């Protein structure tokens, strides 16, 4: 089978299921695992480089408000790859090529590929996506193993924090303007022994304000800008030091939104373990990724 993945988390699922040698096309943002770089990149970013957070937000709103996507698909290259399966999504217009555009282009390709959209809203639905990809590719056995491994890690976190006090937290996935983490993120915080004070499980990430964050009185703030790694998140937090300090939170931690929260793939469980480590380091003394505390 020849697979083209038009969304990073689908690429990660494919490789986790042992399908990496069948992935012939990916997006320009598919950077995990490293072997994904061996596949042809069939998209490019339409946003100008070097924009500030506020400028990115404005540009995205303008482009998506016109019914367009911020990524461009190389239709000729996609056709040349002759895929049997195209994996995409329709959940977020900021995260991938327009689903309607993909379906339209796929209909013109000689190989007549099947198009599957992965659109999880909750943590449970991200596990369902693993099964969906497995069923389309004949990797059901591998999916059972992967899901069992993921479930065991989740169970271990739940057991570790079961007797710990719940800690009020806010997850910020963009800082200018403020957006609060939605969809699966509030669930991850709850499983990790916290209470998400502003996010709603299964709901889109809402635009908010610093006043709302202050009024929530969080004990911990997670800074996890969408598409940005932990070092970049810490830099963004530094730029908003005064606003973050004004919330009264006792701990402000920058984590890798790109790898472990923005993408609803297998590494969400890494994100869960990182959150649990930050909230309850006494019972979870290590984490599978960086958690960089902003010194106030």
Image (tube, grey):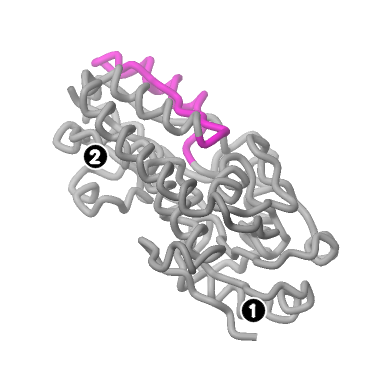
As helix, strand or loop, the secondary structure at mark 1 comes to: helix
Q: Which label was assigned to residue 239?
A: 1
115 lies above or below 263: above
Circle 2 Cα neighbour tier, 10 Å, few/some/many (<14 / 14–19 / ≥20): some
Q: Which quadrant of the view contains residue 80?
A: top left
User: Gap between marks 2 and 1, in whole Å?
Assistant: 36 Å
As helix, strand or loop, the secondary structure at mark 2 comes to: helix
Residue nearest the observer in this picture, 152 or 163: 163
Q: In the image as oriented, which residue stretches furthest toward the bottom?
A: 296
Residue at 48% across / 44% down in the picture?
71
Residue nearest the observer in this picture, 39 or 132: 132
Residue 61 as seen in the image, left or right of residue 80:
right
Is 104 magenta? The answer is yes
Q: Position of residue 7 (x, y in %)?
A: 40, 39
Q: Nearer the viewer, mark 2 or mark 1?
A: 2
Q: Earlier in the sequence, mark 2 or mark 1?
A: 2
């Amino acid at each position: 089978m020849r697979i083209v993945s038009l969304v990073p988390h689908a690429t990660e699922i494919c490789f986790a299921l042992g399908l990496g040698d069948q992935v012939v096309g990916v997006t320009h943002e598919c950077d995990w695992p490293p072997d994904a770089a061996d596949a042809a990149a069939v998209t490019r970013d339409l946003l100008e480089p070097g924009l500030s957070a506020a400028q990115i937000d404005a540009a995205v709103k303008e482009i998506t408000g016109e019914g367009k996507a911020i990524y461009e698909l190389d239709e000729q290259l996609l056709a040349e790859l002759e895929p049997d399966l195209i994996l995409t999504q329709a959940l977020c217009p900021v995260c991938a090529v327009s689903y309607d555009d993909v379906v339209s282009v796929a209909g013109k390709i000689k190989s007549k590929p099947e198009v599957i959209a992965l659109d999880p809203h909750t943590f449970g639905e991200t596990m369902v996506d693993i099964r969906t990809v497995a069923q389309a590719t004949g990797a059901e056995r591998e999916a059972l193993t992967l899901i069992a491994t993921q479930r065991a890690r989740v169970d271990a976190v739940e057991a570790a924090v079961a007797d710990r006090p719940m800690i009020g937290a806010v997850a910020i996935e963009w800082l200018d303007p403020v957006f609060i983490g939605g969809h699966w993120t509030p669930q991850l915080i709850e499983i990790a022994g916290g209470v998400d004070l502003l996010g709603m499980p299964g709901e889109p990430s809402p635009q908010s304000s610093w006043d709302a964050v202050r009024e929530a009185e969080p004990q911990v703030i997670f800074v996890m800008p969408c598409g940005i790694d932990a070092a970049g998140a810490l830099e963004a937090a530094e730029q908003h030091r005064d606003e973050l300090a004004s919330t009264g939170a006792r701990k402000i931690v920058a984590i890798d939104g790109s790898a472990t929260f923005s993408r609803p793939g297998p590494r969400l469980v890494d994100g869960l373990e990182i959150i649990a480590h930050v909230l309850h380091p006494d019972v979870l003394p290590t984490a599978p990724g960086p958690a960089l505390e902003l010194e106030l």
